[in-house]
Image (cartoon, rainbow, N blue to C red):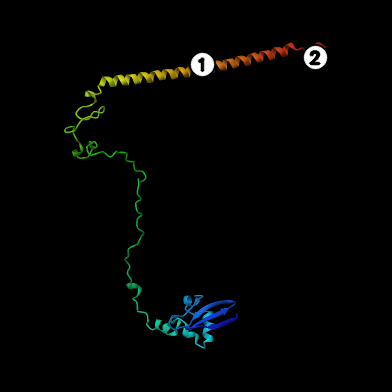
Amino acid sequence: MRCEVTKGTHGKYEVWIDGGSVSVNLTTEEWDCSCCKWQVAGIPCEHAYAEIMAADKDVEDFVVPMFGRSTWREQYDTWPEPVRGQMYWPTSYVLITAPEAPVPPGRKKGEKKNYNRIKGKHESPKKKKKGEPEVLKLGRKGRIMHCKSCKEAGHNSAGCQKFPKKKNEEQIGGETARSSHAFKEMNKSKKSKKKKKNEEQIGDEMNKSKKTKKNQEGSTSQPTDHQEG
């Protein structure tokens, strides 16, 4: 490995190794190399080592204090604290388990779907069921009647003057008559189609039978070679 060191200003150097150059800083404030190995490991890399040797300095002075002999002595300077024996250890404990899974939104499995409509302010509440208080029952007293024909208050459709019941009955009768007439016409058209199909089938069968008869007659009328001899 060929190494060339070029000195710069402010304690910085340029180190060339195998055709590639990096910058090394040996100032007391910060030790770094552009390859970043020195900063990560805390031990000088090959570029920093070459620069330190060129500057006639000790390599151990540029190692992070964590790897020094003094820190190693500080770690083992204090002895471990004494601990009581196993007979004094606690025996009663609570088993720690995972918490219950949260309930997801939506309808649960096996639960019936609620199809009840949300009623308005002026509508009567739901009917009373067994075990429910009687407060839910609401009488007709104080309720305002509305007509479904003219949408006015104070009367129902039976006593409506704008749309009397006779007209409604006549309209209903006319609609039923029209629907019955249309139903009869549909039945007639279906029957006529069935008749046409049956007639066509019968005609095809007659033509087939005639053809078979002609073929049979032709085969019987032709003399065989044995008869002619």
Q: Is residue 111 above or below residue 169?
A: below
Residue 191 or residue 88, whichever sits in front: 191
Q: Is residue 168 above or below residue 25?
A: above
Q: Position of residue 76 (x, y in %)?
A: 40, 82
What is the three-letter code of the residue carrying label 2? Asp
Instruction: Report the residue that reaches farthest toward the left.
Output: 141
Residue 165 or residue 207, whichever sits in front: 165
Instruction: Report the residue that reaches farthest toward the front.
Output: 9
Dot 1 and dot 2 residues touching (CB under 8 Å): no
- Judged from the image, the secondary structure of the residue bearing numbered disc 2 is helix
Q: Is residue 213 left or right of residue 170?
A: right
The answer to which image quadrant residue 185 occupies is top left
- Judged from the image, the secondary structure of the residue bearing numbered disc 1 is helix
What is the three-letter code of the residue carrying label 1? Lys
Q: Residues within 10 Å of mark 1 (few under 14, many from 20)?
A: few
Q: Position of residue 145 (x, y in %)?
A: 20, 30
Image point 47% across, 18% down: which residue?
189
Q: CA distance from mark 1 to mark 2?
A: 50 Å
Q: Is residue 91 above or below residue 59?
A: above
Q: Is residue 173 left or right of residue 30?
A: left
Image point 41% across, 20% down: which residue?
183
- The residue tagged 1 is 195
The answer to which image quadrant residue 178 occupies is top left
Quadrant into which the N terminus falls: bottom right
- The residue tagged 2 is 225
Q: Is residue 126 above or below residue 52?
A: above
Number of the label disc, if any, that sits on residue 215: none
Q: Position of residue 171 (x, y in %)?
A: 31, 21
Q: Position of residue 40 (x, y in %)?
A: 47, 75
Residue 189 or residue 33, whichever sits in front: 33
Q: Is residue 151 left or right of residue 65?
A: left
